[in-house]
Image (cartoon, rainbow, N blue to C red):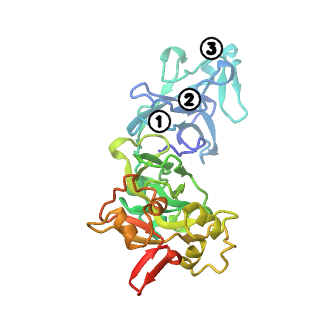
Amino acid sequence: VSDSDVAGAGIEVLVRDRNIDDYVDIVSMDDPGMPNGAELSPPAFGAGGSRCHAKVHDIVLPNGQLLYKKTFRWVPGAGQTGSHRVCFEAVSYPREAVSEAKRANVIQQEDDYYCCSSSWCPFGPGAFDASVYPPGTQRTRTPRCFVIDVLPPKPDFDPPVGGAFLNPENNADLNFRAGCTESIYFAVKDTGVGSATFAYDRAPLPYDVKVILDGGSPPDDLAVLGPLGPDECHPASGEGTACYALRWKAKLSSSEGYEACFAAVDVAGVTQGADMKRRCYRIRVKKCQYCVSEGETFASVGADFGIDWLLMYMANPTVRNPDTLPPGTVVNLGVVYEVRPGDYLELIAQKFHTTVPALQTLNTDVTVEGIIQPGMEICVMPPVCDVKCLYGTDCHIY
């Protein structure tokens, strides 16, 4: 039994009676009772407050006996995992035991079960109550009991597939490019049903699961979208999984100090705390790369970042026409330099014949004070067109 069981599903409780003229009912026993939210159908109460008994099954036994049934239905709630014992007994008595006047209150329904008025009824609404049954009433000697195991959900991420774009490894770096709206995909599923064994052929349906943002220091505009359709997700996500996307449009001004954690949980809200499978990532904006938007050119992008458009053209040899850049084209804004021990911003500017303000424009994560650390990546665009060298070695910006 799981939260995904459809409303029409259930467990049929069957009773047979050799006397086809008997009234037959199936009732639940007070001890142990039925779980909260469970019901028997036909319901104990029909329209207008009437009480109803078991339905005649459409299967007739070879000896002419009739089968009667009620259907046990239950959609467990979030706090109802575990084992639940339910017991039923059958009650029958001849119609002759009921006076003609009282039998007039019994109405046959279209789908072959009987209801009677709330003012009087020969059978009770729930557990057996001798006071409402006439003389000659018979009960089953042994109740029929069964145990329902409500499995807890075990939502988990699918194994990593397809590099960084589907189910990336925990603690990995997720790299985004400024100006691009990019997605990282997660495929999740309930693994609890697959790891259990069942006494019958019909296994319960898995829980519906989802991905939620669960801590860290993510960007304010980072979105978790889903569940996605099969055509929207990576084809390797597999059957029976739910697919979600982490989507973000990074800015060059975005800090590199982001961290985001995600959890696989069930939709019913059973999975909590330590039972949740989590993955955390460092979210980085790739240095020196930018996605152009509609109408942008090397000239307009260069003006925004203080770079000569001709330098950008030289740094992007695969671009044929600097005045025609299709939207989504990734262009280089320079080259990446890894800070070494002893480096400081003025020294790097001197090495590459550029200026500190130009470095700060391309590296918005560098503080106003210009504090940098060894191993940090710095985007540098050497101003080749503005550098003049005397005797081939003495180079300066003019």
Rate crowding at label 3 as few (under 14), some (14 to 19) or many (20 or more) other CA atoms within 10 Å. some
Q: Are marks 3 and 1 in contact (CB under 8 Å)?
A: no
Q: Amino acid under label 1?
A: Gly
Q: Which mark is residue 25?
A: 2
Between the C-alphas of marks 2 and 3, the distance is 16 Å
Residue 40 visible from this viewpoint: yes
Q: Going from the N terminus, do you reach mark 2 or mark 1 first?
A: 2
* Residue lying at 33% horizontally and 59% vertically, measured from the top left: 372
Sequence-wise, the earlier of marks 2 and 3 is 2
Q: In which quarter of the image is residue 24?
A: top right
The image position of residue 188, as x and y in percent, is: 47, 56
Q: Which amino acid does label 2 sit on?
A: Asp
Along the viewing direction, whichever of 376 and 20 lies nearer the viewer: 376
Who is closer to the viewer here, 355 or 82? 355
Q: Nearer the viewer, mark 3 or mark 1?
A: 1
Relative to 343, is 137 on the left or the right? Answer: right
Seen at 47% across and 31% down, the residue is 89
Disc 2, disc 3: CB below 8 Å? no
| Numbered disc 2: secondary structure | strand
Label 1 residue SS: loop
For the point 47% across and 79% down, the residue is: 388
Foreground: 147 or 230?
230
- Tell me residue 52's x, y (percent): 62, 26
Mark 1 lies on residue: 77
Residue situated in front as seen by the camera: 218 or 229? 218
Task: Estimate the spatial distance between the alpha carbons at disc 2 and disc 1, rounded to whole Å.
Answer: 28 Å
Measured Cα–Cα span from mark 3 to mark 1 = 35 Å
Label 1 environment density (alpha carbons within 10 Å; few <14, some 14–19, many ≥20): some
- Which residue is identified by label 3? 120
| Of marks 2 and 1, the one in the foreground | 1
